[in-house]
Every structure is written in C-alpha cells, then in structure tokens.
Amino acid sequence: MRILALDHGTARVGVAVSDPMKMIAQPLEAVPAQPFADFLARLKTLIREQEVELILVGMPRNMDGSYGEAAVRVREFVTVLRESVAVPLQTWDERLTSVLANRFLSEGQVRGPRRREKVDKTAAALLLQSYLDSLASP
C-alpha cells in the first residue's frame, strides 16, 4: 500500500506517490483542478491503480505558523474529498515546498511551458518525502 500526496492549487493539483515501503516519494503528475468532477475521477483512478491507503494533503501555512486564505481553500478541498473518497486523509505542513521545487528545477535547468506542472508534482513529492522522513525518525 502507498501514500498519495496532493499539492492543491487553483489551476492544478500536484500528485506524488510513495514506494510500497513508504521510504521514497516520487512525483507522479499534475492534474487539472477544474472541472472538479474530472479531477475527482482521476484521483479515484490513481487511488485504485496505486493501491493508496492514505492521502496526504499539503496545508499551506505562513512562515509564522498561522493560516491564511490558501489554508481556508485547502480545508474546503479536504472536506469535499473526505465526502468523496473512502481513503483516510491527513494534512501536512507544506511551507516552502513550491519554493524548493522551483529551486530544484532551476538547478536542473528545467525550462519551458510545462515547468509549472513539474513544479506542482515536485512540490507534492517534497511534501510527501518530508512526511515519510518524519515516520522514519524516532
């Protein structure tokens, strides 16, 4: 069984998945956020194909730890997902994942129009890897 991570955005949702041993996160894809019914159908397919036991959703926080408007949107997103899928959901602090994803892609000289999608799924992988690392620490 695997863990699926979602980096919620208004245009796209970055998706990453763990290996079966829950040690390594890998970027999977960026799914268009709208129309929501299409997003939900794709998510359900990924849950089935990847044999997902937990969905981890990035919770945006300000640097001081407070929650802003983006967190309100993610809470609404999580509420709808909980009503739509049978897999348990958990939120996880996603501070700086997009910044780090952009930095990694810049250092790797990833350019072009599809970079944004790569940023989204890379941010989801960074989010998931931080969660997996927390499971491994005593």
Image (spheres, rainbow, N blue to C red):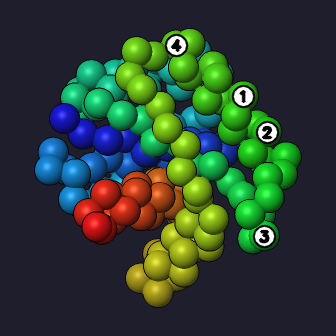
Q: Are marks 2 and 1 in contact (CB under 8 Å)?
A: yes
Q: Are marks 3 and 1 in contact (CB under 8 Å)?
A: no
* Residue 22 higher or lower than 64, as above or below: above
Please state which amino acid type lies under the numbered disc 1.
Glu
At a point 75% along the width and 45% down the height, the residue shown is: 71
Label 3 to label 1, Cα distance in Å? 22 Å
Query: Quick one: SS at disc 1?
Result: helix
* Residue 104 higher or lower than 70, as above or below: below
Q: Position of residue 131 (x, y in %)?
A: 40, 57
Which residue is more in the foreground, 111 or 36?
A: 36
Quarter of the figure with the N terminus = top left
Label 4 to label 1, Cα distance in Å? 13 Å
| Disc with the residue nearer the chain's start (4 vs 2) | 2
What residue does disc 4 label? 84
Disc 3 vs disc 4: which is toward the camera? 3
At a point 30% along the width and 68% down the height, the residue shown is: 137
Q: Determine which quarter of the picture holds residue 74.
A: top right
Please state which amino acid type lies under the numbered disc 3.
Asp
| Disc with the residue nearer the chain's start (2 vs 3) | 3
What label sits on residue 76 in the rendered view? 1
Q: Determine which quarter of the picture holds residue 93.
A: bottom right
What residue does disc 2 label? 72
What label sits on residue 134 in the rendered view? none
Residue neighbourhood size for the residue with mark 2, other residues' Cα within 10 Å, grouped as few (<14), some (14–19), many (≥20): few
Which residue is more in the foreground, 138 or 4?
A: 138
Residue 73 lies left or right of residue 106; in this view the side is right
